[in-house]
Image (cartoon, helix red, strand yellow):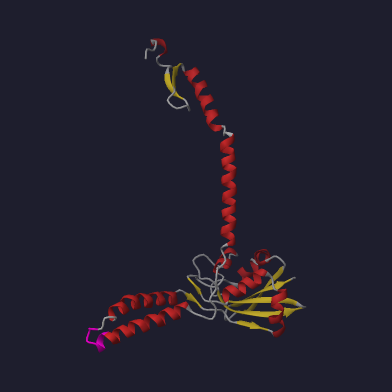
Amino acid sequence: IGIPANTKKMAFISVSSAPFSFAVGSKAASSTLLTRSASQVRKPSRVNQSRQIILASVKSESETKAAASSDVPFEVRGFSLANFGTVLGLAVTGYSFYGYFSSNGTASGTSLGFVYGVPILLIGLALKYAELKPVPVTSASDARAARETKATAIQTKIIKDVTRHRYGDEAHLDTALKALGLIPRGGSCPRLLRLTETMDDGKYVLGLEFFSKETPYATWEQQQEKYDRFFGPNVSCSVDKISEEKRIVMLNIKSLQ
């Protein structure tokens, strides 16, 4: 391509957004071309806008479905998977040892017992290590009867969550306590000891008794305004110091419905 000597320094190749197209010219002309190309790239077409709207709606729908499916699909109550796996693994492994030694190593089924028994035993022990046992519930007779009609959905969910075996969590309600700012940085989570159900002026009250080893009572009081919003709606929350020496705190969630 021939370029005059007096314009060689000002000339350069400008590539536009269109495929396989380029232009050679002065700096001013190329700048105009680049500006037009950039504006064409920045301006979304109607197809792109429709695509973005569809993707946003699909994303919103998927997030809604994920939130709705966050609950446990089924529950096993009064039954420990860790204990079942440990006992089953010990039984299968023990039977395999017995069969092996009693037959002088000629029993055909002993190898299968070792293959399945040892992994089952290890899984059971792993679940036992990560197991959180159910929390006991102390209920007044009238409060237990009123739970079905006066407890809020959040109160009912708390009772269901902490009165069954859980696996892999640091402590009962650890996610809620972290969101409320009740777990100190680098400290341990307050441990839920029990639930209480009482009645106050005809209102159902769910009490959560914690062993708060590293979270001072002052911190529980400072987060007071968060409790109603977090455990709501239709609740009024309060905090009581049960024992300063034993570091026991009670979080009361009173239903207003």
The image shows residue 213, relative to residue 176, as above or below, that is below
Q: Is residue 125 left or right of residue 99?
A: right
The image shows residue 181, relative to residue 43, as above or below, that is below
The quarter of the picture where residue 146 lies is: bottom right
Quadrant in which the N terminus appears: top left
- Residue placed at 56% from the left, 54% from the top? 62
The quarter of the picture where residue 121 lies is: bottom left
The quarter of the picture where residue 191 lies is: bottom right
Quadrant in which the C terminus appears: bottom right
- Residue placed at 68% from the left, 64% from the top? 225
Residues in magenta, as a range = 100-106
The image shows residue 227, relative to residue 35, as above or below, that is below
Q: Where is residue 219 in the image (x, y as percent from the top left)?
A: 61, 68
Q: Where is residue 133 in the image (x, y as percent from the top left)?
A: 51, 78
Q: Position of residue 81 (x, y in %)?
A: 47, 77
Is 163 inside the magenta-drawn segment? no
Q: In this view, does 251 lie to the left or right of 96?
A: right
